[in-house]
Structures are given as C-alpha cells and as structure tokens.
Amino acid sequence: MTNNELNTLLKPFGKSTDDLIYDYSDFNTEAINTECCPECGCENEIMQNGKSNCKECGHKKILPCAECPLNDLSLCDWDEKTQCSAFPKEA
C-alpha cells in the first residue's frame, strides 16, 4: 500500500500517515503486552520495540500490533514485503 493510498483511507478519520509514527521512547522496559506469533499462533509476552522472538518456534520480530496506531482505526497495511507503516522492515 502506498502512502497516497493509505492517506486516502485515513482521510475520513481526520488522520494522515504522519499520525502513524510509532513512538518507541516510552517503551524501554520489559513487555507489557502479549501477541500471538504469526507463524505458529503461540501467545508471547513481547517487548514494545517490536523485536521479540517467538519462544515456541523462534519466529523473529513479533510486532506489538495491539499498540499500532492503525489498530484503533481497524486499518492494517501490513504486507510481507514492507511489513507496515508503524513497524517498517529494517533495511
């Protein structure tokens, strides 16, 4: 999904892609959330920096989707190639 397409989806909510920047600054401590592994479905306690590995299958970088700014709007732009706006794939 391109930025223009995402901005078009967000416009009715009064939001833009600038509002989707994930602020990592408050999340320097242990995980406060759980997420299911996208690979095996196992529930994991995760770090809020989006770099947690699955304790069951070892899947790398389980994302803290519950903390994603798009979650409130029920819009997810994740895909295999780029991952997502809030947690872009590292180069």
Image (cartoon, rainbow, N blue to C red):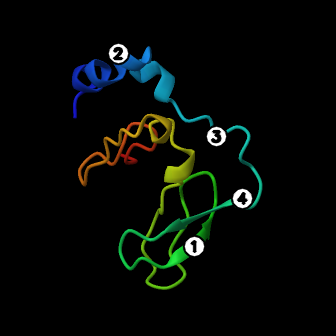
Q: SS class of the residue under badge 3?
A: loop
> Where 83 falls versus 30 (above or below)?
above
Residue assigned mark 1: 44
> Where 79 falls versus 53 (above or below)?
above
- Residue at 62%, 34% (x, y): give it: 23
Give the label on residue 24, or none. 3
C-alpha span from label 3 to label 4: 13 Å
Viewer-side residue, 13 vs 41: 13
Residue 31 image-quadrant placement: bottom right
Q: Earlier in the sequence, mark 3 or mark 4?
A: 3
Residue assigned mark 2: 11
Kind of residue at disc 3: Tyr
Residue 74 percent across, percent down from the top left: 40, 40
Q: Which quarter of the rendering shows the N terminus?
A: top left
Q: Nearer the viewer, mark 1 or mark 3?
A: 1
Kind of residue at disc 2: Lys
Is label 1 in contact with label 3 (beta carbons under 8 Å)? no
Residue 86 percent across, percent down from the top left: 46, 38
Q: Earlier in the sequence, mark 1 or mark 3?
A: 3
Q: SS class of the residue under badge 2?
A: helix
Residue 12 percent across, percent down from the top left: 35, 16
Residue assigned mark 4: 32
